[in-house]
Structure formats: structure tokens, C-alpha cells
Amino acid sequence: MLDYLTLTVALLAGAGLLLPLLQVFRTGSENLAGYILALVLAAALALIGLFTLYPSPVPWAGSLVIPDQMGGVFALVTVGVTLAVTIASFDFLKSTSKPVYYSLLGFTALGMVLLAYSQDLLMLFVSWELMSLPTYVLAGFDKKARSNEASVKYAIIGAMSSAVILYAISLAYGLTGSTQISAVVAGFTSHPSALAGVATLLFVAGFGFKMSLVPFHMWIPDAYEGAPTTISTLLAAATKKAGFIAAIRVLLGITTLYAVTKSPLFTMANVFAVLALITMTVGNISALTQKSMTRLLAYSSIAQAGYILIGFVAFANAPGSSAAMLGLTGTVFHVINHAVMKGAAFLAAALVLLQLKRADLKAYDGLGKRMPITAFTLSVAFLGLAGVPPLSGFWSKLILVLSVANGPYAWLALAAILNSAFSLGYYAWIIKRMYMDQGESTERVKEPFWFVLIFAVMVGLIIGIGLFPQQVINFASNAAAGFAG
Amino acid sequence: MSYVLSLLIALPLVAAPFVYLATRANKGLGIYLSLALSVAVLVIAGYVFGQVYSSPPAGGQYLFQEKYSWISFSSFGLNYFLGTDGLSSPLIFVSALLTVLVIIGSRRLIDHHEAEYYSLIFMFEGAIMGVFTSLNLILFYIFWEIVLIPMFFFIGVWGGPRRKYAALKFIIFTFAGSTIMLFGFLYFYMGMPSPSFDIPTIQAMLQAHQIPASLEYVPLLASFIGFAVKLPLVPFHTWLPDAHVEAPSPISVLLAGVLLKMGGYGFIRISIGLFPGASAQYAWVFLALGLFSMFYGAVAALLQRDLKKMIAFTSINHMGFVLFGAYATLISGSVLGIQGAIFQMFTHALAVGALFMLSGYIQHQAGTREIPLLKGLGTTMPRTAVILVLGAAAAMGLPPFSSFLAEFMVIVAGISASAITAVSVLVPVITAGYFLWMIKRTVLSPAEPGHEVHDMGWSDVAAFAVYLVPLVILIITSYLILTPALPVAQFLKGLA
């Protein structure tokens, strides 16, 4: 019987393999490849949505992949973002090889879906590469010096992180004799050793590159700035989330660090807490000093990764407690919200770049008059990212902070909240520029239909989830409960 | 179940987009629609106020309760929970009244982006109603934050020359303060044996001694920061003079008359109402801070040249009374303190509201707000001068204005806490001093020749009467506010 997952994989792989043929034949509308990919992604989204809402976690491909609800959330988020990026590319992309671009997007989406469901380290690594390799090419798709530099930098750092992950996998296999994630975690727990501790930290570093954790974040601002802005959207809102699902699957169960050192300082909760603290603080402080929108968004995206990590702290601190469930729910919920908010913000920046041909912050002066829909979208996304109620980002941050609010990590909760307040400084500053400052011109600029459509959906989600969060919270909470067993 | 309070929140919020569309289509139509809608909200608020007066809820009880589950999953539960009592109903009423007066006063003073302006006024009003009626801490926080967004735009779009700086400073200060307050709530929630965000539920647990006393300190400190920024308490006040000077005058009325009340309300409802043990233990600190704020505001007001800045510092001085009175009750056990604090919030809203609106008129007519440059108002603008003198009399607490009674009650409560606080009687003296000096320089000085100014019309005089007449009536009918406030004060005293 053809099950949902097989169908999804076949659709995405088929699109990736067949779309380049359009390049050869050069027939029909120049955006044909894009339209096809959008339809394929929409179908994949519907399929994943179906089997996530009505889950039947049966092993697939010999238990390498199990379509559970946790994976379903991440698959939905990543495919959804890819769909938005594809639609935005109809207008944004100026290239002679459009079908290749869309084909690569299809492969990335396939990699992210498989990664979300991977239960085996080798499967995880293969999907990781399937997701990453096309994005190296996409980041350099502009064929300008800047874009190429971004691509090369990203590719080198990406290859390095892949190597680190692969090395960790080899250690894990050597120690436990298995690549099944559950077996590795069980083996690390029952036979803690120094090498297992090293492997754990290597996993943290390897996944940390994609999750944009400080100090593994150096490549992010350059890559996001140089890459076509649609691809920056993909990197910030989708592939980053793939790093988080890998970390959730592999790292949340491991306690070997403490078992080896016997020091209360070296617990996974402490590792995550320190990473979360420096990630959000460095991200927010750096964002404040940026002069270009894409770099500002890049640093803001780094800061958000710090918030998402708070759930890891709550979970690692007391697995099985109600705070751990709150934390994991908050992590999953914030992943969903962040993808929407950051996606909206990056695509708004993409449209400004497309129409005004500039990305510096001065271009945003008086934008409220020139591009009212874009300015409104950006404002809503920014207020959401700052955690202003009643927008979606408020709820997920609230749950994350709540999970550590009282107990040994109360300082992290306070730090997260102060960071939020601090971040409003640069978000409100941009809103001020758009609505209160005088721009160079007050002439209306065209806002293309496809962009407006995506903006409407995303703003609808940010406000809608903000007012009626129950359904989405249930979704995240069920995924977290299913994962915690 | 009653829907009155939901209506009070929803009516302005739903009205906002319609007001926007109407004002875009036709400015006059928009202003009349705004006026009609704000009067409708005032009628509902008056009904709520009247009901609370005629059947005051017992301590810890709330009228017009509404409670629905909003979000719940695993161990987390959040309710949409509204209710009102003798503490919030006067504030609801005065906020609705000031909104009407602000809309009347804005028609001449606001001359661009009117559609956005009037719709934001309604967004502000809806959020304020939410703040004063929420009985759930998270719901309270949500409305608390929504208030910031219209205020940010009010200052930043319709303000004076340094408006953008003032708007950013305002939003960052108050947002930082309120997020710290939120941290306190979350810390409190996670520490409770059976967590809840509902204020009545927490108070029931407090009465049954189910909440460990040691849990109260962190949230008391955290919420103190949030409320102290809003009140504002010296030294958290530096955003206030900037915001007031740059904000257009009608918005200053909302800022001083309504937004500052959120701080005083928070101190009484939450700092004392939810953390009574810790509050009572540190009541002396709060009392001293309140007293310092009273003196600081009064002395700083004495030094101002800008009429509006002077009134802004008067607000700091007056709001210090609220904190002082509320905590005097915890020390002395005299209910006069909390009753007086509630009364003071009501009278301050009207008296200072009138003065801020007046400063806008004076600037509009005379072209300046600098006290040394305003000369001979008594001869050139006699009607304005009379209103200015009456408003100043109300603000300095001169009988027959009820501000006298409010300040008197607070000072008596303070003296019954400790005789040392009798120094607080000096504050009204300084206040009278700077107001009289201001009047001497502006109203009683000789007019400069050749300076043509127009006096305000009788319709404007009527609008100002709406601010000042209730203050005179209230000194006789003070029971309207004090009767429902009594069970609140007794209940809070009993908790501590």
C-alpha cells in the first residue's frame, strides 16, 4: 500500500529530479517550474498535515524513519516555509536558470522532511546533507561576488559541521555498536565514558552551527546578507529548525556528561543554559548595531535560537517533570512561531530589496507611506519577535520562560525577559523609522500580488495564533508528550 | 453571567477600525462618531460604577465576574477572567470620562492623521478597560502591554520636536519595567503548590496560608519595578517629563490621567493584594519611597520654566501620595490610607487632566508654554486665566476641591503609621507655593503691549467645567468613592 510518507517523498524527489528538464526544453512560462514546485509543496504540506493530525507512527524504510508527531511539526514548518519562499521567488528571482533553483529547493525540502523523521544517526546524516548541499548552491545563486563569497563561506563552515557530526556518529557507533538514536542514547546512559562525553559535545557543536548558537554563529550574518534574500529566509526559518529537531532527537536524552564528571557544573542543562544565555545576549546586542536589514534579521534570528534553547534547559534539568513538558512544548511552539515571524520579516526585507534595490536601514525611512502592506507586515512580525502580546511570539516565549521561572535556572528566565525588553529597542527603532521618519520619497511602490498573499497569510497566523493559541499549543504539547513518551 | 465588562473592553476595540474608516471618509463625521462611541462607553462605565456603589462587593469579592478557560494544556491553565470592585470601578469611570473629554479637546489641537489618531484612542481605551478589569495576571499583563502601542504612536507621530526620542524612551522604559513584572508573576506561579494566575484564587490560597511566605519576595520586587516605572516613582521617572513635554496635550491628559493610574492600581491590587506578607514587612521602604517621590516631584516642579513640565512633575508628586497612602494602611492599620489612595487617583486624574488640556490651549493661543513668557493672562485671556486658577487650586488640594480630602486622608493615615511622616504636610505647602508663583507670573503680571491673543470660547469653558465640577461635588458626596473602597481597604489590611 502506498502510504502518506512514501507519497510525500516521491512527490518531492520527483519534483527535484524532473524540474531541471524544463531548463533543457525551455518551454512555457518562465515561472512554470516555480508553479509546479509550489503545487508539489502544497500537496506535501497537506499530506504531512494529514498524517501528523492522525498519526500512525509506523516504521518506514526499516525503522530508519518513523513519522511521529514531533517530526510532523518540524516537517510542516520546514515545508511551509519552503512553500512561502517558492511563492515569493516568482517575483524575486531574476535568473536564466530558474528551473534549477526550484529543483534545488525541492531537494532541500525533501532533506528537511526526512531529517525531521529520522530515528537513525546515518539516516539523519544523509538527510542533513541532502538538506544542506542544495542550499550551498542556492546561497550563491546571484552569481555576484558578494553572493559567491557567502556561498563559499557557508559551504566551508557547513562542511566542517558535517565533519564534526560525522565524527561524533563514528564515536557513537564505536561505543555502542549501533546507529539507532535510541540505542545510542541508552548506551551512553548505561555505559558513560569520557569518549561518550566528547561525542555529546561534538553533537552540540555540529548541530549548533545550523541552530546558529553562539559561538558557532560566525557565518550566519555574512551568509544571510550575501545570499538572495529568499534563500536567507529559507536558512533562517527552515534549515535552522532542522538543526533543532536533530538536537531534540539526539541530545535531549543524553546525561553522560554528568555521569562521567560527577560534577554538578557539567550537566547538559548547564551546557544548554550557558549556550542559551550567550546566544540570546550576543544576538540581541549585535543586532542593535547593524546598519543593514538582513544583518539585523540575522542577529535577531541568532537571539531567537537562544530563546528556543530554554526549553532544552527545562527538559534536561528535570526530565519527566511538568516544567520539562512546559519547556519542550514551548520549544516546539516557538519553532512554529519563529518560522512564521522570521519568514514574514525576511520576505518583507526581500520585497524592499527587490523594489527599492537596497537593504540598508535608510531605505526603511518612511516606508509606511511607500509600501504600507510591507511595513505593516514587518511591524507585526517585529512586535511578535519582541514578544509583545497578544501576538503569537508572546505565548511561546511565555511558556519557555515559565518552564524555568522558578528553580535553579530562574536567572535564565530573567535574562530571557530582559533580552526581550532589550530587543524591542531595535525592533521599535525600525518601526519608528517606517512610520515616523521622513523618507526620501513618498511615492507609492508596487507590492506584487504573490508577496501580498504570503504577507496576509503570515500576519493572519501571527495575530490569529496570538488571539486563539489553544489549538496550536495542543499540537505542540501533544508532540512534546509523544516525544517524552 | 454578565457581559458588561467584556462589552466595556470590546466596544472601543471594535469601534477603532470603524472610526478609522469614518474619519478617512469625512473628518467631521469621524469626530462625531468618536464622540458618540466614547459617550456610549462612558454610559456603560457609569452603570458599572453605579452598580458597584449601590451594592459594593465584600472584600475579595468582585462584581460582574466573567470567567472562561482560554488556554490549558498539561499543567498550565489560563482563564479569561474579569471582575470589578471599589478599587477598579472609579478608575474605569474616570478613564471613560477622560476619553470623552480628550476627544472633545483634540478636535482643535490635532490637525494631521486624524483617522489614525481617533482609532488609536479607542484602542487605548479598550486596553485600559482591560487592565482595570482583569482578574487574571497574564490577561492583566497582556492589556498592560497593549496600552503601550497606541501611546508609542501618540507621542511619536503627533508629538513635539523631540517626539521620536521621547517615544522610543517611553516604550523601552515601560516595556523593560513590565517584562520584569511578568517575570515576577511567572516565578510566583511556578512556586505555588497548586499554580494559578487568577487573583481571587491566589487570595483564597493566601488566606488559607497555602502559599509559602518566602515565595512573595521575588515577585514583590519584580512587580515593584514594573509599577514604579508606570507610577512613576523617583528614580524610575525620567521617561515621564520627556513623554509629557513631547506628547500633544490631549495625550498628556491620557498619560497623566489614565496611564499613571495603572501603576497605582498595580501597587494596590497586586503588590499589596497578592504579596501582602512581604509588602507588610517592607512597608517602610515603600512608604519612604513614596514620601521621597512626593517631595522630589514638588521641588522639581518648582524649578520648571515650561508650564507642561511643571504639571508633569506635579503628577509625580501626586502619585507619590498614592503609594504613601496605600502602604501607610499596612503599617498603621488605618483604612484611610488605601481609601485616600483610591480617592487621590480619581481626583488627580481630573485635576491634572484639566491642567494638561489647559496647557495645550495656552500654547495653541499664546504660542508658548514658557511660564516667564506668559504674561498678563488675567487681562488678555480672562476666561483661560480663571480656569487656570481653578485647576491649580484643585491640583494643590484647596477646599472645596475634593483633592483636599484625598490628600488629607493619606496624610492622616501616614501620621497614624508614624509621627515622623507628619513632614508630609509640607508637600501640599510646596505644591501651593509653585502653583501660586506660577499664577503670579502668568495671570497677575501686566500684559505685554501689542501681543494679540484669543481667549477660549464658552464651549471650551463648558468642557473644562466637566473636569472641575465633579471635584467640587465629590467633596460633599465623597461616599460615592469611599463606600465601595472601604471593603477593599479592609480586605487588603486583613491579608497583610
Image (cartoon, rainbow, N blue to C red):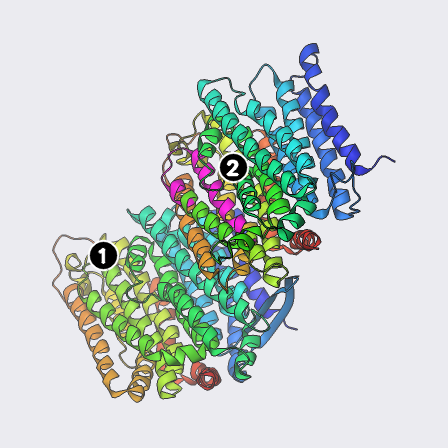
Residue located at (46% from left, 32% from top): A219
In the foreground, B316 or A78: A78
Q: Which residues are magenta?
A: A284-311
Expressed as whole percent of the image width and height from the top left, the position of residue A45 reads 71, 37
In the foreground, A456 or B473: A456
Tell me if A61 is positioned left or right of A427 in this view: right
Does A310 lie within the magenta span? yes
Q: Is residue B312 visible?
A: yes
In the foreground, B312 or A482: A482
Specify the quadrant of the image occupied by residue B424: bottom left
Specify the quadrant of the image occupied by residue A292: top left
Disc 1 secondary structure class? loop
Q: Nearer the viewer, mark 2 or mark 1?
A: 2
Which three-letter amino acid code belongs to the residue tagged 1? Arg
Q: Is residue A458 above or below residue B266?
A: above
Expressed as whole percent of the image width and height from the top left, the position of residue A274 reads 46, 50
Q: Residues within 10 Å of mark 2 (few under 14, many from 20)?
A: many
Residue located at (21% from left, 81% from top): B423
Does A308 lie within the magenta span? yes
In the foreground, A461 or B375: A461
Expressed as whole percent of the image width and height from the top left, the position of residue B2 reads 63, 72
Tell me if B65 is positioned left or right of B49 in this view: right
Residue located at (77% from left, 43% from top): A50
Q: Residues within 10 Å of mark 1 (few under 14, many from 20)?
A: some
Task: Tell me the chain of label 1.
Answer: B
Q: Which residue is mark 1?
A: B369
Q: Is residue B64 above or below residue A64?
A: below
Quadrant placement of the C terminus of chain A: bottom right
Q: Which residue is mark 2?
A: A209
Specify the quadrant of the image occupied by residue B393: bottom left
